Amino acid sequence: MAIVTGFMNACVCLGSAAGYLIVCGQVFVVVFPTDDATRNLFVVSVGIFVCCPMALARHVGFTRHLAAMTVGALILLVIVVAWYMGEHRIDESVTTESFLLGPGEATFVAYMNSINNMIFAYNNQFNVPQLTRELTHEPSRDGMTKVAILSTSVTFLLYALVFLLSVLAFGVAENQKDSLILDLMPVREEIHVRISLMAVMFSVLTCFQLHIYPIQQFLAYLVRKARGCSSDDEKADVVYFGRSLTRWYDIFCALGSVCLVVLIAVVITSLRAMLDFIGAFGAAYISFMVPPMWIIALRRKDEKNFSWFSREILFSVSFLALGLFLFVFGTYSAILPILGL
């Protein structure tokens, strides 16, 4: 169960990190109009000279110092989209019906892929264990609850503003491009648009390490399991060139993860396809299937008081059924557009 969950978690992180590099490539194409070969070269360069050094960090807590700047970058993007709507008015494809229900030709698969995107957008559980581990003091339940409410509220507010303004500004269906970055292509000469796009690039690169670290941890975990040791054995491990063998494994896993992410970002250039698939395949499993399975497994340890018909267990089973549906049908819906069906 740990290996399966770790693998799915690593898939989510791979998709997220690759999506960030795809965004960087799109920003580069918009700001500096160029061909696919130059775009791929830029993505590879960012991966080697920016992402690889960040991946070698043994801790991720340092990124919290950049968190306020990344939120500011997203707020700037919201302001730019609002400016675009003010300059060009509401797109003619937006009507009351299309705004609330989507375009008339929208299918159930299209709605399912929208749900995949939302699941992906809020799936960040993989960062919590490492971030809490690096805190200088033991967190309290009340403190963590306040942090969770604050972060979720800010995220929801930004997502809602981006959704409302971008749909009104750029329309629905065919009027929308692969991402909001490409939607701003017609006004790329405006200086504030370029600044906002560069800020978005800075934001996603800051978040990159948060997604590489769980992949590195999972790969290192597999290596340690294969060697029959744990992370506690690092101090007694064989030392090569001033570092333990375990640390060299960690470095290899980190750099290997970045190389794989760069390869995915070069091969797959569609951000929407990436988010749809990862949101269904990985994020639905982590968000909707793992929590109820954990609750059921914990409650079953108390055999005397366990009952499948208690309200908590029935709710967990229902939640698990929903997760299974999102996992199976969501993945099927995400694969169809990729196959051109």
Image (cartoon, rainbow, N blue to C red):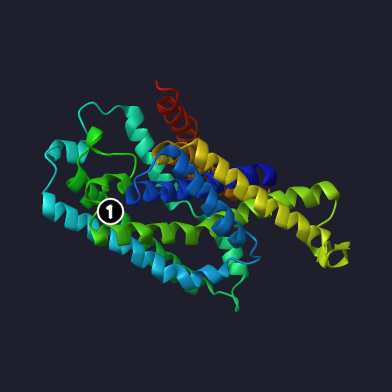
Residue 330 at least partly seen: yes
Horizontal side of residue 72 vs 243, given as left or right: left
Assess disc 1: are there few (<14), some (14-19) or many (≥20) residues with their C-alpha within 10 Å of its C-alpha.
many
Location of residue 78 with respect to 103 vertically, above or below: below
Horizontal side of residue 236 vs 247, given as left or right: right
Q: Position of residue 224 (x, y in %)?
A: 79, 52
Location of residue 145 with respect to 278 vertically, above or below: below
Q: Position of residue 52 (x, y in %)?
A: 61, 56
Residue at 70% over, 51% down: 253
The residue tagged 1 is 162
Residue at 44% over, 33% down: 330
Residue at 55% over, 45% down: 262
Location of residue 146 with respect to 37 vertically, above or below: below
Q: Quadrant of residue 263?
A: top right
User: Who is closer to the viewer here, 124 or 205?
Assistant: 205
Q: Position of residue 84 (x, y in %)?
A: 18, 53
Total residue callouts: 1
User: Who is closer to the viewer here, 254 or 263?
Assistant: 263
Q: Amino acid at mark 1?
A: Val
Location of residue 77 with respect to 59 vertically, above or below: above
The quadrant of the rendering that contains the C terminus is: top left
Q: Secondary structure at mark 1?
A: helix
Residue 317 at least partly seen: no
